[in-house]
Each structure stands twice: as C-alpha cells, then as structure tokens.
C-alpha cells in the first residue's frame, strides 16, 4: 500500500477541517478560495450550491499529484437562497423567515483528482425550526453564533435546540456531507481506512 496523494482543502472553514477529521482525513494543505459567491439571476439553489463547490475547487492552485476537495452549504426556502448573514438585521430576517417552517440545506462537495478530473455530489437535507418568538430570535442573534453563516444559524451550536425536525445529513447541514465526501475522495484516488 502506497502513500496517499496530498490533499488540499479549499476552504478556510474550521468546521470543514473538523468534519474531515471525523472520517480520519487530515488535509496536507489548506487554501482559501477567493471567488464571487453571488447567485446568478434566477439561479436555483441546487445549481448554485454545486457551482460554488466546483468554483471553490478550481480556484485554488493544485500542485502536481494533489487532490483538491471543496464544499458549499446553501440554505434555501423554496427558490430563495439565504446567503451568509452579514449583519444582525439580515440574520433576524432569515430567522423570522425560517421560524416554524421547513427549509432545505444543500451541501455540495467537489473534488479534483490528481489527473484534473472534477467530481461533484450534493446532499439535500430538510430542517424545520420550531416557531421562534422575538425574544428567542434576539437571544440567538446576541450570541453572535449565526453571523457569517448561511441562513444565519449554525446547527452545531445553540441553533440545534431550535430544530424541531430534520431529515438528511447532519454533517451536511454543518458544512460538509461526510458520506458524499468519502465517496468522492475514494473515487479521486484517496485511500480511507
């Protein structure tokens, strides 16, 4: 058994690094992709999530023999994409919209193997928040936890107590669907125990 190729994680997210560690994968290098994450006019959430993962994977320099892995997590209500909450007012609007209803969390992952082949997969999870009162929303905003997160919340923290029901990939909602990631890494020539 030979050594694994070098793995580049195209993400500055500590959550994605932690999630990879859950399946015994430690990136050899971390590179933060610099891309425009604006949705295109009329772009559907699923198409957007896949495009973002692919663009992030392509945006980092891949050395000879390296494998790149990138991910994108998109929160969607119907056809509406809820991007990262930039401030408290945006976050409040997102949480009010998500209150008492189901939404989709689309978590796409892309790999580029040592020969330059791009592969993608996506997980689609459904999350329903309990009905949130104004005080609960304010308390969550005050925690600072959901700022800069898609949809204005982080399920791996305090927001998990707001989830009434969920179907799909918990790791995908956090930021990287481990089942799909494992499949893609293997298909790209990365050996996992």
Image (spheres, rainbow, N blue to C red):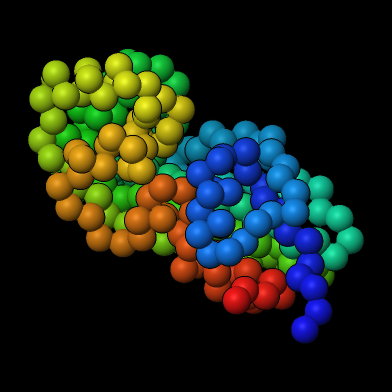
Q: Can residue 37 be seen by looking at this rendering?
A: yes
Q: Position of residue 15 (x, y in %)?
A: 51, 44
Image quadrant in which you'd find residue 4: bottom right
Image quadrant in which you'd find residue 113: bottom right
Relative vertical location of residue 89 with respect to residue 51 in this rendering, above or below: above
Q: Can residue 120 be seen by looking at this rendering?
A: no
Say whether residue 98 is left or right of residue 175.
left
Quadrant containing the C terminus in the rendered view:
bottom right
Residue at 20% x, 44% y is 163
Q: Position of residue 64 (x, y in %)?
A: 89, 61
Say whether residue 35 is left or right of residue 147.
right
Looking at this view, name the residue that lies furthest to the bottom.
Answer: 1
Relative vertical location of residue 146 with respect to residue 102 in this rendering, above or below: above
Quadrant containing the N terminus in the rendered view:
bottom right
Residue at 22% x, 32% y is 97
Q: Position of residue 155 (x, y in %)?
A: 33, 42
Residue at 50% x, 67% y is 180
Say whether residue 59 is left or right of residue 37.
right
Looking at this view, name the residue that lies furthest to the right.
Answer: 64
């Amino acid at each position: 058994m030979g050594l694994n190729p070098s793995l580049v994680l195209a993400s500055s997210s500590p959550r994605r690094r932690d999630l990879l560690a859950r399946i015994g994968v430690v990136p050899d290098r971390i590179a933060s992709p610099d891309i425009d994450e604006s949705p295109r006019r009329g772009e559907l959430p699923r198409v957007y999530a896949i495009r973002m993962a692919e663009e992030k994977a392509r945006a980092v320099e891949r050395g000879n023999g390296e494998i790149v892995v990138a991910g994108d997590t998109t929160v969607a209500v119907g056809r509406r994409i809820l991007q990262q909450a930039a401030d408290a007012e945006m976050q409040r609007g997102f949480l009010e919209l998500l209150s008492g209803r189901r939404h989709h969390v689309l978590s796409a992952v892309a790999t580029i193997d040592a020969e330059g082949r791009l592969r993608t997969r996506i997980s689609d999870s459904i999350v329903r928040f309990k009905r949130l009162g104004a005080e609960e929303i304010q308390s969550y905003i005050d925690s600072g936890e959901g700022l800069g997160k898609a949809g204005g919340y982080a399920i791996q923290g305090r927001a998990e107590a707001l989830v009434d029901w969920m179907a799909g990939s918990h790791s995908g909602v956090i930021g990287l669907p481990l089942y799909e990631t494992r499949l893609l890494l293997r298909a790209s020539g990365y050996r996992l125990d």
